[in-house]
Amino acid sequence: MKRVGVIGGGQLAWMMGDAAKKLGVKLVVQTPSSDDPAVAIAQDAVFAKVDDAISTGILAQKTDVITFENEFVNLDSLSVVENQGVCFRPRLAALTPLLDKYNQRCYLKDLGLPVPRFFAVEQPENLQSQIEDLGFPVVLKSRRHGYDGQGTFIIQDLADLQQKLNLHITNNDISQSQFLIEEFVPFERELAIIAARSVEGEVVTYPVVETQQEEQVCRRVIAPADITPNQAAEIEAIAHTLLNSLQVVGVFGIELFLTAAGKILVNEIAPRTHNSGHFSLDACETSQFEQHLRVVCGLPLGNPALHSASAVMVNLLGYEISKSDYQNQRQKLAEIPQAFVHWYGKTESRPGRKLGHVTVLVDHQNRDVISTIAQTIESIWYPTRKFPY
Ligand code: ADP
């Protein structure tokens, strides 16, 4: 029996529950509240924020290895724990270049991987000329702690940019160097790939998927993406280069843009399991969550292949403040043929909050039919008013 400590107790840790049972792994989570989803499936918990390294030291005493479902940790204080001999998978050095979006872009660029043009907001006096090189619109991003589009702003002109920066500086008392600016990529589609690398250095990748965002938040994922074999090979090669370069032991989600001209650019790396891989729970031989536990425990990698022709995953996002558990809607969703409803058990719903997801397995790859299934799910889940309001 292996004991795995997980930093974070949200839905990503919650979805490790079944795989942990199957593999005989004991899970202990570090998470702030006893209401957090993964507390229900964990054998034990350390109740603390994810960036509380002293509590991670306590987590280490209860476990053999520590991994992450949330990367918003404090690497400096965590490295003290690692230096005491605690095993982190991925090790902290593999996370160091990734946690700040500017550093991450630099790392990818230095590796020769294709990324949008970008620069760090450092000297306000140079801002105008740097932006002129890119041309509006541009994308302003918080360098740290961005998720689900929080901290990502599409900026149309200089006045808009100055207003956003001033707003952030005065509201949050943070300096301009905490932002990066990059070219707006007029992508045709967004894609993603989940990749896992084992202790032995073997890498496997899941099928490339299409992700559909609205207001910068993932709404739907279609597996596999409708792309050429060359494009799929290019994306798999990006995943191999990145994971091997970082020598990472873990599971990563890689988000990409596909332009109308067929060019692929890397948008973002998540150093953990990812929303774009949730379909794998029901649609693949080995889910990304089982794969994560396998690599962390030093077990052989599982087969990531799809066992249906395709699958569509739809996020169930909150659209109101409520304590409802939405039994009625969940029941209707479960009646869709080949549907698997996953409900994270969060105690409160808020607009945009990820409350659950539905995956439907499909025995063909007809895009129109797949879109209709996604629409059916959303019409059951969302009230008649369109979200986001
Ligand atoms: P987060 O870390 O909050 O998920 P991302 O950087 O992934 O932020 O951005 C969220 C979404 O915003 C992306 O999925 C995409 O739809 C849009 N976006 C981000 N960067 C760009 C860009 N450079 N050009 C066009 N759209 C972008």
Image: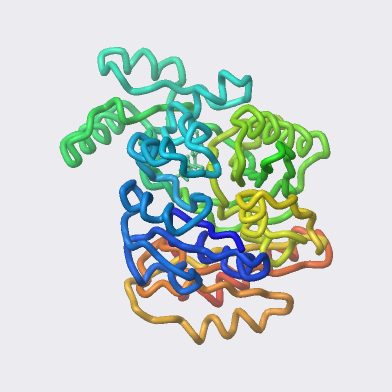
Residue 386 seen in the figure: no
Q: Residue at x 47, y 62 (%)?
A: 28
Q: In this rendering, would 166 be left or right of 12?
A: left
Q: Residue at x 38, y 28 (%)?
A: 180
Q: In this rendering, would 270 be left or right of 156?
A: right
Nearer-the-camera pick, 186 or 104: 104
Name above or below for residue 112 compared with residue 75.
Answer: above
User: How far across and how far down the image is residue 196, in percent?
Assistant: 67, 45
Q: Residue at x 81, y 39 (%)?
A: 228
Residue 352 seen in the figure: yes
User: How far across and how far down the image is residue 223, in percent?
Assistant: 72, 55
**Picture quarter with the C terminus:** bottom left
Name above or below for residue 354 compared with residue 216.
Answer: below
Q: Residue at x 48, y 36 (%)?
A: 92
User: How far across and how far down the image is residue 159, in percent?
Assistant: 27, 29
Q: In this rendering, would 162 be left or right of 14?
A: left
Q: How is the image coloured?
A: rainbow
Quadrant position of residue 279: bottom right
Nearer-the-camera pick, 136 or 191: 191
**Picture quarter with the N terminus:** bottom right
Quadrant position of residue 181: top left
Name above or below for residue 188 compared with residue 343.
Answer: above
